[in-house]
Image (tube, coloured by chain):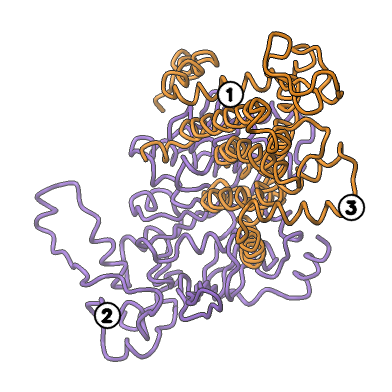
């Protein structure tokens, strides 16, 4: 721990590129390239899957940042890198003054208590052989938050109640509960260690719409009650619109646009964001029919061999000659509205 | 939230009791139940051997050599005048002791190696698996023979010879279990609850023992039940070849070995231990197959 602190003091964080100084999380040029190997005995790397290829963003204390994009664009990998479940290829992840990518396992442990995660699939994120009470109590025990078993049980019941579950569920097994109830258990487990920052990795995508709304409301209530900071990874734009303060749009391992939620939904600058927002249907058949859809052509390219220049140029309706040569810089088009496109 | 009522939950929790589960097993697995009955009979035989016979399994008696089965000696006597029924009964102790010890120790070591190998992955996995490959390249009996030949040169007493037999049988069983468990553990390693445990900074030991091992119990139990029969047969084979348990310890394989000379004139000396081995291994294998079918739904349709 001492060593960890000394790292943060000797290596000053880089100058903020995206946001002010009150950032809790600061991601700089994060890259996660997974090697593709060939050969049975002597394996050699033949290519890299560039799941995340140099992204920058900040999350302010108490803020909810939405991270949206289609499947395979690197949203989840970004979350896993912050959680240190993957060893990032390059880049920096500053959390409250410490670069997580430079910490070893022991130095990371106290920080793991402050960074928690809620997974997408409520069925596979709970160990089927453990009771709900044990699942929630285990992190408290390991992190030494409550050492007394009785007090821990009381706290488990309190957390269940907080998450809208019957405290009696502590004696149940996960298979005895519904998806929504399990997701609430997942939230209770994340809260058990009093975290500051929670990564919600598609936390409501696997739930029914009615249950989704309840869980979103729960997440909002908890955010207000405990001053939580969220990274909300999702592909559901309406959920992101409702819950997030700012939104980052990812495409093929890059962040193409980042802005305040209202600004982004009202005035999308990047052609990909525009296409993404236009794909959201309007719940009125006459309006929906009359709308001029700008459908982007083709398929998302493979992250193994991403297009040169701007990764979006092969599908972009606005692309010009220069797009296939230079990667556009991530620039501040209007105050607080960042975009990676030369044509806007 | 559409709250599930307490009554509904009680209903969910009201799962079938042990007795009705056994009844279901018996109905779905008639052969396996037959196997289970044999297993239970053998266990009872081993436990109550001293109460089932009046004779000493190792004491020689020169006035009752080669007696054919009669009222006093239901299975006859052997060349040293020892009651064969008594030796068959006590032989079950040797067989089950070796069978269960090898199966449990072999599977458990395999479980730890398999889960550890899958969890750590990378170079650890590679090294473990290549060592396992080397072990698996030898047929079980050849491997056991090699180990016994090494340990035999140590000149041990007949009573402790059984421990070397156990080592010789356990070692080749380990890679079989490790491999099966590893494949299950590899799948489990990718499940989000293991990620959740890692994201929480739990120690490797805790993740392996609390989160992975309990979820590979099905293949582990299947391997144990399958190994018991195998181990009993291996012990009998080694003893028959003179490399296993040493005289005068009562063991079925050893009894068969000694009966070779007399098989034409006094066949009962060979028949009864042979029946004991055949029935026992058959019973354990049937039971093992039934356990596998009950625990692993994926194999059921095949």
Residue hosting label 1: A167
Identify the chain drawn in orange: B
The residue located at (38%, 80%) in the rendering is A305
Residue hosting label 2: A314
Residue hosting label 3: B154
Q: Give the Cα distance between marks 1 and 2.
A: 54 Å
Q: Secondary structure at mark 1?
A: helix
Is label 2 in contact with label 3 (beta carbons under 8 Å)? no
Mark 2 packing: few (<14 Cα in 10 Å), some, or many (20+)? some
Q: Nearer the viewer, mark 2 or mark 3?
A: 3
Q: Quadrant of the N terminus of chain B?
A: top left
The residue located at (20%, 51%) in the rendering is A282
Residue B63 drawn at (x, y percent): 84, 18
Whether residue A157 is visible here, answered yes or no, is no
Q: Residue furthest top?
A: B71
Residue A93 drawn at (x, y percent): 61, 68
Q: Give the Cα distance between marks 2 and 3.
A: 76 Å
Q: Secondary structure at mark 3?
A: loop
Q: Nearer the viewer, mark 1 or mark 3?
A: 3
Residue A65 drawn at (x, y percent): 48, 58
The residue located at (75%, 15%) in the rendering is B48
B56 sits to left or right of A119: right
User: Could you tell me which chain the residue with mark 2 belongs to?
Assistant: A
Look at the picture and state if B96 lies above or below B54: below
């Amino acid at each position: 721990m001492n060593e960890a602190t000394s790292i943060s003091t000797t290596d000053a964080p880089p100058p903020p590129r995206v946001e002010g100084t009150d950032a809790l999380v600061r991601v700089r040029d994060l890259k996660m390239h997974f090697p593709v190997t060939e050969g049975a005995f002597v394996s050699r790397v033949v290519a890299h899957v560039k799941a995340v290829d140099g992204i920058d963003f900040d999350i302010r204390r108490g803020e909810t940042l939405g991270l949206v994009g289609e499947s395979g664009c690197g949203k989840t990998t970004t979350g896993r890198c912050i959680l240190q479940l993957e060893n990032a290829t390059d880049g920096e992840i500053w959390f409250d003054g410490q670069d997580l990518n430079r910490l070893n396992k022991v130095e990371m442990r106290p920080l793991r208590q402050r960074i928690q995660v809620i997974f997408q699939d409520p069925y596979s994120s709970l160990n089927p052989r453990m009771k709900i009470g044990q699942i929630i109590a285990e992190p408290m025990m390991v992190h030494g938050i409550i050492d007394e078993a009785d007090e821990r049980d009381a706290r488990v019941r309190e957390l269940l109640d907080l998450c809208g579950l019957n405290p009696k569920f502590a004696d149940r097994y996960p298979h005895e509960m519904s998806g929504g109830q399990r997701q609430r258990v997942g939230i209770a487990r994340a809260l058990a260690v009093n975290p500051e920052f929670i990564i919600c990795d598609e936390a409501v995508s696997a739930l029914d719409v009615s249950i989704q709304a309840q869980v979103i409301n729960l997440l909002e209530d908890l955010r207000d009650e405990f001053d939580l900071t969220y990274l909300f990874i999702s592909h559901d734009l309406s959920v992101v619109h409702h819950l997030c303060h700012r939104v980052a749009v990812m495409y093929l391992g890059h962040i193409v646009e980042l802005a305040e939620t209202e600004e982004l939904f009202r005035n999308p600058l990047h052609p990909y964001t525009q296409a993404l927002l236009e794909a959201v249907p309007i719940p009125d058949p006459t309006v929906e029919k009359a709308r001029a859809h700008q459908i982007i052509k083709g398929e998302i390219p493979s992250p193994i061999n991403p297009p040169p220049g701007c990764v979006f140029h092969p599908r972009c309706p606005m692309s010009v000659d220069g797009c296939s040569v230079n990667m556009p810089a991530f620039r501040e088009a209007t105050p607080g509205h960042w975009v990676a496109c030369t044509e806007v | 939230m559409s709250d599930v009522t307490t009554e509904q939950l009680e209903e969910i929790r009201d799962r079938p009791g042990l007795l009705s589960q056994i009844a279901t097993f018996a109905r779905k697995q008639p052969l396996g139940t037959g196997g289970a009955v044999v297993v239970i009979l053998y266990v009872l035989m081993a436990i109550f051997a001293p109460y089932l016979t009046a004779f000493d399994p190792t004491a020689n008696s020169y006035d009752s050599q080669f007696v054919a089965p009669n009222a006093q000696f239901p299975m006859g006597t052997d060349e040293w005048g020892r009651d064969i029924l008594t030796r068959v009964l006590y032989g079950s102790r040797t067989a089950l002791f070796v069978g269960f010890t090898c199966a449990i120790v072999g599977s458990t070591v395999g479980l730890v190696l398999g889960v550890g190998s899958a969890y750590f992955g990378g170079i650890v996995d590679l090294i473990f698996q290549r060592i396992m490959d080397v072990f698996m390249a030898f047929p079980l009996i050849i491997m056991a023979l090699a180990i016994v030949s090494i340990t035999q040169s140590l000149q041990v007493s007949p009573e402790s010879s059984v421990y070397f037999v156990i080592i010789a049988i356990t070692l080749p069983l380990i890679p079989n279990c490790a491999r099966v468990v590893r494949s299950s553990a590899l799948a489990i390693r990718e499940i989000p609850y293991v990620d959740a445990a890692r994201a929480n900074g739990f120690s490797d030991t805790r993740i392996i023992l609390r989160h992975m091992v309990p979820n590979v119990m099905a293949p582990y139990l299947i391997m144990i039940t399958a190994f018991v029969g195998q181990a009993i047969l291996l012990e009998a084979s080694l003893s028959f070849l003179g490399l296993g348990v040493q005289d005068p310890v009562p063991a079925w394989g050893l009894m068969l070995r000694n009966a070779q000379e007399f098989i034409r004139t006094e066949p009962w000396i060979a028949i009864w231990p042979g029946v004991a081995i055949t029935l026992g291994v058959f019973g354990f294998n049937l039971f093992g197959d039934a356990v596998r079918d009950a625990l692993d739904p994926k194999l059921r349709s095949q």
